[in-house]
Image (cartoon, helix red, strand yellow):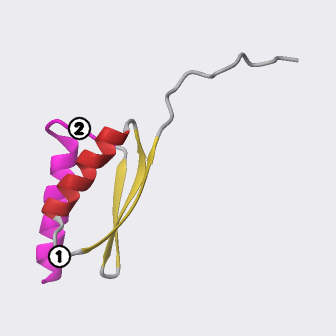
Amino acid sequence: MSSGDAEYRIARFRDRLMGGEVAELGVRIEVRGSVVLLTGTIPTADHREEILRIAETELAGLSLHTDLMVACADPPDRSEELR
């Protein structure tokens, strides 16, 4: 696979993340040698699964590593003590 083909597929993946049902702007996509690295913090586990599904489709055949963290938006289970 040529580097131009990989760049085109990565650009298309970025476009799909920014539009449509995902609309995710917090994912960073980096190319390190022959590896595509996805990093960032996203709002839900469902969002993460959708991003990974799209990545597998768009970036099939490329070496892919992911480090996507799901933000914890749960309310605190106890009150904060102020001193």
Pointer 1: what residue? 61
Indicate the amino acid at tag 2. Answer: Ala
Quadrant showing the N terminus? bottom left
Q: Give the left or right position of residue 73, taking residue 39 as reference.
A: right
Quadrant showing the C terminus? top right
Numbered circles on residues, count: 2
Measured from the top left, where is residue 45 in percent x and y? 36, 41
- Distance from Cα at disc 2 to Cα at disc 1: 24 Å
Q: Which residues are magenta?
A: 1-25
Pointer 2: what residue? 23
Up-down relation of residue 23 to residue 49 (above or below): above
Q: Please tell me which residue is depicted at 42% across the width and 50% down the height of the picture.
A: 40
Indicate the amino acid at tag 1. Answer: Gly
Q: Secondary structure at mark 1?
A: loop
Neighbourhood count class around disc 2 (C-alpha, 10 Å): few under 14, some 14–19, many 20 upward? few
Marked residue nearer the N-terminal end (2 or 1): 2
Q: Main secondary structure of the magenta part?
A: helix
Q: Is residue 54 magenta?
A: no
Q: Secondary structure at mark 2?
A: loop
Measured from the top left, where is residue 12 in percent x and y? 13, 57
Neighbourhood count class around disc 1 (C-alpha, 10 Å): few under 14, some 14–19, many 20 upward? few
Q: Are marks 2 and 1 in contact (CB under 8 Å)?
A: no
Up-down relation of residue 60 to residue 3 (above or below): above
